[in-house]
Image: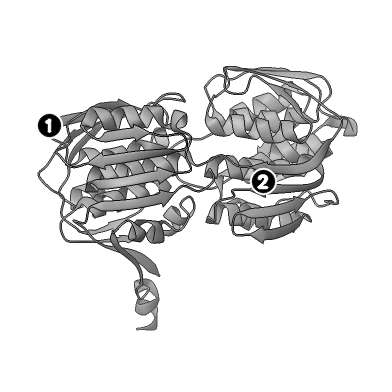
Amino acid sequence: MTKYLIHGGNSLHGTVQISGAKNAAVAIIPAALLVDGACRIENVPQISDVTLILQILRELGADVRVINRTTVEVDCSHIRNRQVPYELARKIRASYYLVGALLSRFGWAEVPLPGGCDLGGRPVDQHIKGFVSMGAEVEVRNGLIYARVPSGARLSGGQVYLDIVSVGATMNIMLAATLAEGQTVIENAAKEPHIVDLANFLNSMGADIRGAGTDVIKIRGVGRLKGGSYSIIPDQIEAGTYMAAVAAAGGEVLVKNVIPKHLDCITAKLVEMGVDVEERDDAILLRRTGALGRVNVKTMPYPGFPTDMQPQIAAVLCTAQGTSVLTEGVWDNRYRYVDEFRRMGAHIQVDGKVAVVEGVDHLTGAPVHACDLRAGAAMIIAGLAAQGVTEIDGIYHIERGYETIVEKLADLGADIQVVSVPDEDNQAQVG
């Protein structure tokens, strides 16, 4: 078993390069199933979720070639297998994008219910609503999603109004509609940058998708998509995580390979707390030398403050002066990390979707657990700011979404390393 070991108290200085967006990559790679020919996908992050989704495509019969560290070539022209391996799909939330892609191409899909972080109820009912509106029959049984178009016909365009703003459903319906007959309209669509990125990828291969980034998306189905090249956008949440780390630990860092507009909601809160932020064309310079002030934060769909940044901003607020209020507007179960912060001396009270954070003079290093991807990133931020040693287990969650995070932080002056420790359960069994 491996853990992260952090000796806190070092301010961060230097430059960090942001990788490709996880949430875009895990939808764009399955979208290659719709393409007749080879897709060259660049700026792909080296994270375990990407490794898993590429392995699933290989199991389905795709030709996957790794060109270099950030570039892959995927050719799904000759895929015949449409049954997604259960053990792989259950490890990743984004496996549900395979339903939309396979249903669009073959008119039939059998995909295990997805895994990923436990953030409360994340039903696929809105996805199914979209597929049914296009003529599919869908049922969920025995841990599998079965979807098919009767009589082997193609999906047909439909009108879909999403009952909630759902990123996953918006993207999955886009995938299904790309090769459908006629026009599909998604109303109350999510607007996140990775939705626009998926639409741009599909359009570059010959799709006809308009309105991505607004709450109404129109997809006119086409007969086929052709191969081509595409570069994934930078990761908004990875960038925000390093921004939060600078705010918590202090120092001066240039965050490169970003789209500053995507970070406006995060930047605004850090500036409100007293962090100096300077925007450049494709970079942001952050500087924090003085004390942090309190802020109130409510997570909302884009362009609001992202739910995927809520644990990280909570880590920053633990040592801010005064009392801050966090309100979670997206997920039901996003405060499981609070007990870990309390181990480090944080004062946080949770009531439903509201957390009240009373700033303390300092955090103290302690053994903590990464209960999910973004909570794990928050543990790192807290450890960087704390006095003493922080030991983080469950780091496989963190590696699902952050490329070489230990190396990137070490380059900024953090005292962080990966250590191997005996597996206590195995030791007990041997004993």
Above-or-below relation of 329 to 12:
above
Q: Is residue 120 left or right of residue 298?
A: right
Q: Nearer the viewer, residue 170 or 291?
A: 291
The picture places residue 382, in percent across and down from the top left corner, at 25, 49
Query: Quarter of the image containing the C terminus?
Result: bottom left
The structure residue drawn at horizontal position 48% and vertical position 55%, both measured from the top left corner, is 403
Residue picked out by circle 1? 322
The picture places residue 317, in percent across and down from the top left corner, at 22, 37
Above-or-below relation of 10 to 276:
below
Q: Nearer the viewer, residue 223 or 339?
A: 223
**From this viewpoint, is residue 421 visible?**
yes
Residue picked out by circle 2? 29
**For the residue marked with disc 2, what is the amino acid?**
Ile
The answer to which quarter of the image holds residue 118 is top left
Seen as rendered, the residue at the extreme left is 361
**From this viewpoint, is residue 85 visible?**
no
Seen as rendered, the residue at the extreme front is 281
Query: Quarter of the image containing the N terminus?
Result: bottom left
Q: For numbered disc 2, what is the local secondary structure?
A: helix
Q: Nearer the viewer, residue 119 or 270?
A: 270
Q: Nearer the viewer, residue 114 or 414?
A: 414
Above-or-below relation of 89 to 135:
below
The picture places residue 273, in percent across and down from the top left corner, at 22, 31
The picture places residue 198, in percent across and down from the top left corner, at 64, 34
**For the residue marked with disc 1, what is the amino acid?**
Gly
The structure residue drawn at horizontal position 78% and vertical position 40%, both measured from the top left corner, is 34
